[in-house]
Image (cartoon, helix red, strand yellow):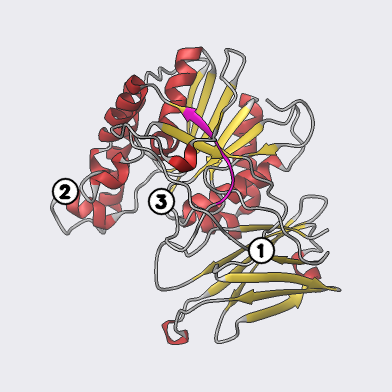
Amino acid sequence: MGTGGGTRFFALYAHRDHCAPSPQTFCISGQGCQEKKDCSNDGKTASMNAMQPIAPLSTHDRIWILAPHPDDETLGTGGLIQRACQTGAAVCILFATRGDKNPWGQALFERTPFVWSDEAAERYAGLRREETWRTLDVLGFKTGPDRQVEFLEWHDQSGTSHLLTDSAQAISALRESIVRFRPTRLFLPALQDAHPDHSALAVLARLALGTDLPFSAPDVYAYLIHQSKREKVSGQPVALTLTPEECATKRRAIECYVSQLVFKPQRFLRFAAEEENYLHESPVTLPAQSSWPVQMVSIQGDQLHVRIQSKIPERWGGTRLHLIGVSADKKVCTATLPLTGSREISLPLSSLGAPGQLFIKFESGCSFFNKMGWLHVLCQ
């Protein structure tokens, strides 16, 4: 629980060691991959032996969970939800999108190719809402004064658009929910999640937390659902160890999302692991030396320089660099720059509102999932 100081950040498999080669130069790195242990495996995973347990929940805790889509609350925090309900902690789950834009998955589930209409999207959103309520029931989550569910009703795959073109309203919506619930702990998507909705909501939530909150700053944790194949993770995670009963219940809850299990069900069921792992994260510095597309960020005077490392052929097109500047008075400025051959971008820092911090993301036009999420850079 926070006690009035700065918000403490944790992240599931998302921490990076701090490294600033020079006062105004930041490079990026990832090292050392952690593994998750399945409940059916009796052997301990060596890389997790030294993991510290998460601080125990209590009846005084107020847990706020941000789910980009229906199912993320269970994949990332299904064990936590059970434990909170058993402990008597208050829980609020905010679903950002309706999960209504997955035509390929919907076509497989409904066994029809005719799923590209608005009517089909509404039908799919309704199905996923029904699955959500069944899932929460399995997890022991019963709505009431201390068990709240909220829906922003955003369209699926709209997170980046909300962040880049409608950030003020999106931040306000998240802040309103947070202030109303007054949480002691928040569980958010990871900044480095490869799904653009997840990483965009991670930025929006952090911007909402950066506003003046009328209560003690909560502890913040992040969960990672979609990890880039080239992304390695470092750091010492904090674990919520599930009992065999909690693990089995989480698996049954995941199985309630029938519409999501038609393609590679084991990809979802692997989240019914013995542990839900989170990691302490400092969100204001960048570590060093990586194969990430954004290889280096530097500031020289009023010039921001970003070096890109990418093997995507220029002829594919659609590669872009998104930048978000946040000033000391919390004003947000955004810019999107096309990458047409140049692998080093320079622009006046003042064009982003003289920011004290930056969020930077490389986006390719050849894949829905990203090679990286958003990088959070402290400029001053």
Q: In which quadrant will I find the N terminus?
A: top right
- At x 42% / y 21%, what residue is drawn? 82
Mark 1 neighbour density, 10 Å: few (under 14) some (14–19) many (20 or more): some
Sequence order check: which comes first, mark 2 or mark 3? 2
Calculate the distance from the C-alpha at mark 2 to the C-alpha at mark 1. 47 Å
Q: Is residue 141 left or right of residue 29?
A: left
Sequence order check: which comes first, mark 2 or mark 1? 2
Disc 1 marks which amino acid? Answer: Ala
Residue 84 in picture, x, y percent from top left: 49, 19
Residue occupied by mark 3:
156
Q: Residue 258 magenta-drawn?
A: no
Mark 2 neighbour density, 10 Å: few (under 14) some (14–19) many (20 or more): some
Residue 140 in view here:
yes
Question: Tag 2, which secondary structure?
Answer: helix
Question: Tag 1, which secondary structure?
Answer: loop
Label 2–label 3 contact, CB within 8 A = no
Residue 288 badge: 1
Foreground: 109 or 252? Answer: 252
Foreground: 332 or 291? Answer: 291
Q: Is residue 29 above or below residue 307?
A: above
Foreground: 273 or 261? Answer: 273
Residue 209 in picture, x, y percent from top left: 68, 40
Most extreme residue toward the right, as rendered? 301
Residue occupied by mark 2:
110
Q: Is residue 1 above or below residue 365?
A: above
| Residue 176 found in image quarter | top right
